[in-house]
Amino acid sequence: MALKLMTKNLRNRISPMLSSASLLHSHATSFGFKEVREEEKSQMVGKVFSNVASNYDLMNDFMSAGLHRLWKDRLVSELSPFPGMKHLDVAGGTGDVAFRILESVNSIGRRALQDPVNDGLQEETQIYVCDINPNMLDVGKKRALERGLREDKSLKWVQGDAEALCFEDNSMDGYTIAFGIRNVTHIEKVLTEAYRVLKRGGRFLCLELSHVEIPIFKELYDFYSFSVIPPLGELVAGDRESYQYLVESIRRFPPQEKFASMIADAGFQKVEYENLAGGVVAIHSGLKF
């Protein structure tokens, strides 16, 4: 009964904020539930991720009870990495997804060592980790060093904007973005850039926190998001405001069907999505033909 009352009060608090925010475009000038100018948003998001960079993976473990690791494993399994591929991981500064892709490629390479046809393919593999935030990239480079991968020629670290990538047209076999696209100013621009840099036959994959539709689960999820995560951020990382933004940004992100239609509008075909944990996260995918 007490939980039901708390979730009702929480719903009454956030509903007006969501209604106000919904007047904006899906990608638009919003920073969580606040309306901001477009030129301000990137600076404000940049500050958030500079603040959370050093505790990013630790907080992901706390917030998801470690499930984010399984979700990223699922993302990489959907990608089906292969030796010799050229891959772009966007908003992947800490290297979590890139390390998984590299390990998958290396495991295939180890099994193929006896095959002279595959000799040298492992060296040709190129995994670009692109992030707009230098602090997140520094965390990734440090983790690569700790894993003995700092000098690995397959990993390339690039500071860049998802809305204006520095890569050539039709240059990538795969594109992933995990827990990053909801933080950009223009989702459509990110999708257009993803389509541009992918080769024909290339695959787009996006892992993102999404929308829970099961009523009871949704109430519990909202309660956890707004009443637990910000205080947890303050306790573990000494930063309540950044984590308040993060939970608000999830509610501002387009629902699964709407986001799928945006991917299709960017030119991708065979667009589909898979809900994980009841819609807490979703993996969207599309192919470039």
Image: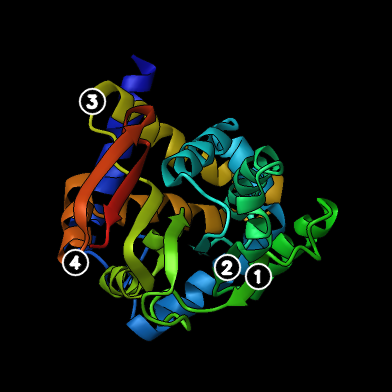
Residue type at numbered disc 1: Lys
Give me the residue at 31% from left, 29% from top. 219
Q: Look at the numbered disc 4 and give the secondary structure of its residue.
A: loop
- The alpha-carbon separation of the residues under discs 1 and 2 comes to 5 Å
Observer-side mark, 4 or 3, equals 4
Disc 4 target residue: 267
In the picture, measured across the screen, residue 71 lies left or right of residue 269, that is: right
- The alpha-carbon separation of the residues under discs 4 and 2 comes to 23 Å
Disc 1 target residue: 156
- The alpha-carbon separation of the residues under discs 3 and 2 comes to 40 Å
The quadrant where residue 220 appears: top left
Q: Are marks 1 and 2 in contact (CB under 8 Å)?
A: yes
Any part of residue 234 in sight = no
Q: Look at the numbered disc 1 and give the secondary structure of its residue.
A: strand
Check disc 3: other Cα within 10 Å, few if <14, some if 14-19, many if 20+. Answer: few
Residue 266, x across and y down, in percent = 21, 68
Q: Indicate which disc residue 128 carries.
A: 2
Q: Quadrant of the N terminus?
A: top left
- The alpha-carbon separation of the residues under discs 4 and 3 comes to 34 Å
